[in-house]
Amino acid sequence: MGLLIDVHVHTKRYSACSQLDPGRLIERAVKAGLNGVVITEHARQWEPAELEALVAQSGHPGFLLLAGFEYTTTQGDLLIYGLRADEAHAFEPGWTPAQAADRVSTLGGVCIAAHPTRAGVGFDEQLLTLPLSGIEVASVRMQPHEQQLAMRIAQTAQIAPIAASDAHRLQEVGRFATEFEDPIGRAHELREALRRGRFRVAGVGARRKSNQ
Ligand SMILES: [Zn+2]
Ligand SMILES: [Zn+2]
């Protein structure tokens, strides 16, 4: 069994749209059967010291807590992993998907297309020309028909499908997750696992269900 990780979570610390109290995130993630969480605030990446402090407070000292960020391009959102916080914060508003993806590649990071088919978020054909490591095909913020369409796009483009909660509330953490095949303890290991496609969609509450 690999590692079950939710790679798309917003907390109210830096995402104004989120009600999720970061102080309760890890406890909730453990209850949901997750082995790890990646906090991906909008246009902001948690510093390593902030992540360490949250883990230290949680009562789960070995819990895998990492950070990426979500960048809103002119035509859809990208989840970005493997950059330093200062590199993340140098992204300027208003870049196209290609501009943002180029910057990520230059800095050695990886991108995933977030909810590409969600109503009102027009990613269109540009999506298929980007150097993506994955396409989000399921989250609590994607309707079933949007999930099906995203899966078809991923299959057609031969880009790895990925599932994550996109949680903005505590109870949403882990509702969707992805299983990673290799041990991951640090940000660069997540980046390499994403780059190499060493993961698969785990479905809704996969581990909890299989344990019952
Ligand atoms: Zn949000
Ligand atoms: Zn999001």
Image (cartoon, rainbow, N blue to C red):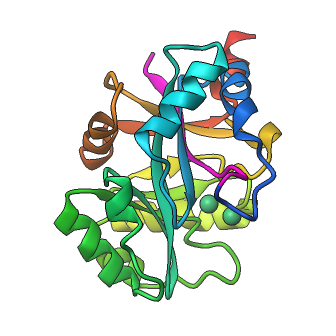
Magenta part of the chain: 1-13
Picture coordinates of residue 31 (x, y %)?
73, 20
* Magenta-drawn stretch contains 8: yes
Q: Does 27 sit left or right of 187 as displayed? A: right
Picture coordinates of residue 15 (x, y %)?
67, 60
Picture coordinates of residue 109 (x, y %)?
27, 56
- Give the number of marks: 0
In the foreground, 62 or 162 = 62
Q: Answer yes or no: is residue 159 visible.
A: no
Say above or below: 175 vs 207: below
The residue under the point 35% across, 76% down is: 128
Say above or below: 82 vs 112: above
Say above or below: 199 vs 89: above
Q: Does 111 sit left or right of 167 as displayed? A: left
The residue under the point 76% across, 64% down is: 17
Picture coordinates of residue 69 (x, y %)?
48, 58
Q: Answer yes or no: is residue 163 visible.
A: yes
The residue under the point 55% across, 46% down is: 39
Classify the position of the C terminus by image quarter. top right
In the foreground, 21 or 200 = 21
Say above or below: 22 vs 34: below
* Quadrant of picture, ligand 1: bottom right
The residue under the point 71% across, 25% down is: 32
Q: Does 103 sit left or right of 37 as displayed? A: left
Classify the position of the N terminus by image quarter. top left
* Magenta-drawn stretch contains 87: no
In the foreground, 107 or 13 = 13
